[in-house]
Image (cartoon, helix red, strand yellow):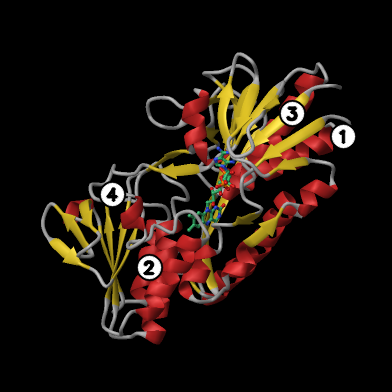
Amino acid sequence: TNARLVVIGGGFGGATAAKFLKHFLPNTSVTLIEPNETFVACPFSNLVIGGQREISQQAFTYDGLRALGIDVVHQTAGDVDVDAHTVSLLEGGGSVAYDKLIMSPGVDIRWGALEGYDEAAAEVMPHAWKAGAQTSLLRQQLEAMEDGGLVVMSAPLAPFRCPPGPYERASLIAHYLKTQKPASKLLILDAKDSFSKKPLFLEAWAKLYPDHLEWRGAADFGRVVSVDAPTMTLSTDFEDIAASVANVIPPQKAGEIAERAGVADETGWCPINPLDFSSTLQPDIHVIGDATIAAPMPKSAFSANLQAKFCAMQIARQVAGLDLEPTVLANTCYSYISPDQAISITGVYSNADGQLASIDGAGGLSPENADDSVRTAEAAQADTWFRTITQEAFG
Ligand code: FAD
């Protein structure tokens, strides 16, 4: 067909979507708009922060997508004209026309939503919630810290990218402190009382890091209400805490282009029809990945990947004049609790009734109080998962 298919964002959702559009519709032009020549993956970036991995192992290029005939344009999408069906390009000028547009712009930080946390503060108190320079900065700060220092992490309310991510990171930072800076400690200040895989993380922390990690939830005045970068202070309603290293994971929203395209609602996230991940706000635009409102599916690379493949398939069906069919989607999030041990949570979701719903009795969690062999087996599975998903997106 002559349909022009355009994808904004070459991360886990967008790169996978471009690839599968080309796979299902080999004679159709597929354009991927992504500013960066190298994509730096967030999954496994907590191992870089913990000192088990190099940041270079997180980097992927777009050569594989180009080799498949996808037109990769290294530009920022500046705006979407929904009436003219065009995407303007920020750096180079000009625009790209689309018949169907998939957007997977990931998240942006809500600067200022946490008092005192702006772009300048993030250079001092890194979020490291987009991988790359921020990841390396947090790692360098931990390495430079003297033994005896206090590391403080601030975790946000849901929804945010990678629900178990802060707690995996906390585990790996605690492991670094225990083995390299034993007089130091990590304090997690949390805006909520419950979080993903909480019983499994609490069990691991009690066993592995009793002297190096403390978690404080909202009920214990854990919620950070403001930060002050010059003095490295995080404030709760109860006290001011001075940190040697501060990792502030701030409130987030859909990538800014979503708002400009008119596909984000007042929550800052993008409502979609789960039958094909089409925007409920604009025609001929589909949104996938972290930017969407797709609960109970979490904001994960696993979800973005599966949503990408499913969305590409539904667009191919539409282009071919076929009816849309509902499906079953799934997600597994692995989290390292130490460099060689991991836990997981799996969900299975149906979109048959016009909304995403967890299928009762499907999915589940790693067992509590399991043998170390169960945890090491899951770490091996996590490693295979990462190699598979990055190969599928960028290979
Ligand atoms: P992204 O992968 O972030 O891709 C968005 C892309 O859009 C970027 O390349 C960006 O440059 C581009 N973009 C943005 N705006 C524009 C624009 N205007 N024009 C053009 N391009 C644009 N998930 C898991 O499944 N498992 C894990 O173990 C895991 N661990 C994680 C650990 C950490 C510390 C973090 C922070 C996240 C983790 N995640 C994990 C979550 C995962 O990283 C995200 O869910 C995933 O990246 C979402 O994919 P996406 O396509 O929505 O966004």
In the displayed structure, does residue 62 sit left or right of residue 8?
Answer: right
At x 45%, y 43%, the residue is: 108
Under circle 2, the secondary element is helix
Q: Amino acid at mark 4?
A: Lys
Q: Residues within 10 Å of mark 2 (few under 14, many from 20)?
A: few
Q: What is the x, y in percent for residue 38? A: 65, 56
Q: Amino acid at mark 3?
A: Leu
**Sooner in the amino-acid sequence: mark 1 or mark 3:** 3
Q: Nearer the viewer, mark 3 or mark 2?
A: 3
**Sooner in the amino-acid sequence: mark 3 or mark 4:** 3
Quadrant placement of the N terminus: top right
Q: Work out whether residue 293 can be spotted.
A: no
Q: Which residue does the numbered mark 1 point to in the structure image?
A: 26
Under circle 4, the secondary element is loop
> Marks 3/4: CA distance?
41 Å
Between residues 20 and 33, which one lies in front from this camera angle?
Answer: 33
Q: Amino acid at mark 1?
A: Pro
Quadrant placement of the C terminus: bottom right
In the displayed structure, does residue 139 sit left or right of residue 359?
Answer: left
Q: Amino acid at mark 2?
A: Glu
Q: Which residue does the numbered mark 3 point to in the structure image?
A: 5
> Marks 1/3: CA distance?
12 Å
Between residues 209 and 114, which one lies in front from this camera angle?
Answer: 114
Q: Which residue does the numbered mark 2 point to in the structure image?
A: 203
Q: Which residue does the numbered mark 4 point to in the structure image?
A: 192
Q: What is the x, y in percent for residue 37? A: 66, 53
In the displayed structure, does residue 339 sit left or right of residue 268?
Answer: right
Q: Nearer the viewer, mark 3 or mark 4?
A: 3
